[in-house]
Image (cartoon, rainbow, N blue to C red):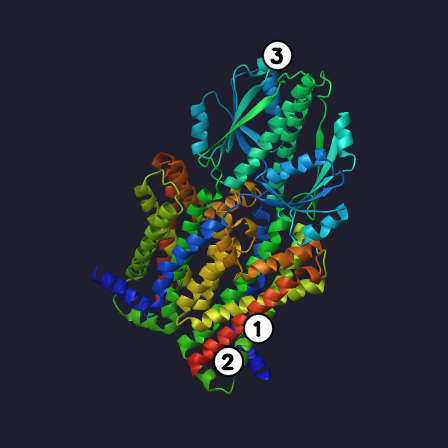
Amino acid sequence: MRRLWYVMWKELLELRQDPRLFGIIFIAPVIQLTMLGYAATTDVKNVPIVVVDQDGTPASRQLVSRFDASPYFTVVATLPSIRDVDPWLERGKAWMALAIPADYHTGIDAGRPVTVQVIADGTDSNSAGVAMGYAANLVGAFNQDLARERLVAAGRDVPPAAIEARIRVWFNPQLESRLFMIPGIVALLLLVITTNLSSMAVVREKELGTLEQLNVTPVTRWQLIVGKLLPYGAIGIIDVILVTTVAVTWFRIPLLGSPLLLFATSCIYLLTTLGLGLFISTISNTQQQATMTATFFVMTPMMYLSGFIFPIENMPAVIQPFTYLIPLRYFIIIVRGIFLKGVGWHVLWPQVMALLAWGIVIVALAVARSRKTLN
Amino acid sequence: MKKAFAVGLKEFRQIRRDRRTLMILLFIPIFFLLLYGYALNFDIKHVRLAVEDRDYTLESRRLISAFVNSTYFDQVASVTTDREVSDLMDRDQIRAALVIPHGFGRDLQRSRPTSVEVVINGDNSSTAATVMAYAQSIIASESATYELKTRMRMPGGGVVVLLEPRVWYNPELKSTLFLVPGLLAYIAMITAVVSTALSVVREKERGTVEQVRMAPIGTLPFIVGKSLPYFVISYIAAIGVILASMFLFGLPIRGSVPLLLFSLGLFLAGALGMGLFISAIAESQQVAFQIAMLSSFLPTIMLSGFIYPIASMPIALQLVTTIVPARYFLVALRGVLLKGSGIEIIYPQLIALAVFAVLVMTMAARRLRKDWA
């Protein structure tokens, strides 16, 4: 036990060598979370559109003002011809164009269907799809009002048979992406900080030659790995408390579930991220190799295959099984569940158990590997 | 220039000795593209749906089959109570539920307005917005058929404005075409920054920097020389990624290829310069790695317009994105690839990239000069 204590003390002393490190690992996550929390917005609002109104009558202007009045669209220019649309979309100054044909008002007056064109820049397929949906809804509502006006004028206003869609959104009724993204950003920041720290832990001693010295001391492999794990774990726990506080107090993310469960599962998650880092450290010969391995084989897959941004169910069936190898996959479900749904142990236990198993296996692997490097 | 070349040669020999690093730098980018290019998409289909049909008439079954036939929804459960819906939702077994009330069919037969309920899991707001749009359009088109039946009997009731949607540059709205350029920028950025971030500080830690200090070479040629081999490696890897995305994902190159290669070169120079700057200011490899990851990993993904449109961010944050080089590269890249934009459109982006590259390189050189003096 005393030896374990010495290893931990030595590790902390080494971390203190570059005093900026503490600033980076405690302050940077807070700053990053405050910035990135605002970045994660997929809400499409104020889509800039240009209008080509070849009709130019009160009837056509009625439709244009409908677009302008909507919170989803902002008319940024009126153009004389459809040919002028191209540079606007190409430069990204407008995302959409609305083109009204010259025979618009005659068609409306005669009660015959008229076609207006909406041209969207499809480069950002996601925003384009949502904006097209808004345009379709807007024109649909406009149609109903138009038909209603006619029928009222003719004195025959009868509500027609229709199905109203009553949509209820659970867990995040305002559809704020922030609520969904921030718990995930918290998990990723913890990953970056802790895996970074631990992936250098053993290989640094290898590179500096001090591992040879440790080799002749009576410190066992378990003591070495655990002694390195614990101080980093302590740093990780401080970071957990810091970023969770920012998420709850600054961004007002509701913490519906148990804070205790959140804390306990965060510790298990730290076990996996630190264990992964230590494992990388034992299999690398230089710090350069360790950083490469950590960046490319740990952080990037965690980012993309965990369901943090890209839903796992959208992925091809061949790739989906691989996501079970990603510990962040389980932790993302856990944090979102605890934060947004307020679910507890009875729902989350499979994820917690998977995460725990992951952590134990990876730490054991790190110990097994360090035995080889020490001898 | 000759001196810079000599430093480059020395650095290259050092890289060659570390096989694993060289292999990672050359081949990982293409492997990433293969894996993530397929994995990343926002095309939402087969949304898991539970149906609670309390009506059980011809009309209700018609609506259910409209949902299933749209291919956007897969009916995975039939339930009888709201409790079951909430339980399935808690366990993530379903993303949406359709609840048809008793009397739904009777109302429609008697030409009366009625309603159905759609419950959507909102935890992922962008998925939820898309699912909501699908559900609304399916219900609206079902509704329109009933509506039209009653309205057609009235004069003037048939007037409609039809919407003809056109999508330019990416007519099928494939999110792959949007995301693959972003992935390309991410891969190039991370490879460049991580490969150079340790290069100077490593020599500081080992003491070999003392030898370089004594050598008759200025800090700027030293910095440029350090980045040369990485520039060549990253450039080759990036071209491999572009070729692979053309063959695998049908990524078009609608603009000019030299322009594409030129923008890529500017971007890589900036990314490598940033890595060297980090390396120059760090005292240990540990600190260099932390700064490198914190400044390039999440920002390149979240503040570059790769996934989240910059225009939707708060103004203060939009200002922060001006120091993210990937932001400019992405506009140029998507412009050249998807829109066929020429230099007259993307020159502001190219200037920004060039300014960034020159700035970080000189800052790195000045910092070293201060250290060595």
Of label 1 and label 2, which has the lower sequence position?
Answer: 2
The residues bearing labels 1 and 2 have C-alpha atoms spaced at a distance of 17 Å
* Position of B244 relative to A285 (above/below): above
Label 2 and label 3 in one chain:
yes
Callout 2: SS: helix
Question: Which residue type carries mark 3?
Answer: Arg
According to the image, label 3 marks what residue? B110
* Image quadrant in which the N terminus of chain A is located: bottom left
Q: For mark 2, name the chain.
A: B
According to the image, label 2 marks what residue? B219
Instruction: Point out residue A349 in the picture as x, y percentages from the top left corner.
Output: 37, 38
Question: In the image, which disc is placed on residue B199?
Answer: none
Say whether marks 1 and 3 touch (CB < 8 Å): no
Residue B229 vs residue B267, the one in the foreground: B267
In this rendering, which labeled residue sits more in front, label 1 or label 2? 2
Quadrant position of residue B269:
bottom right
Callout 3: SS: loop
Instruction: Point out residue B85 in the picture as x, y percentages from the top left corner.
Output: 46, 27
Question: Which residue type carries mark 1?
Answer: Pro
Say whether marks 2 and 3 touch (CB < 8 Å): no
Of label 1 and label 3, which has the lower sequence position?
Answer: 3
According to the image, label 1 marks what residue? B229
* Image quadrant in which the C terminus of chain A is located: bottom left
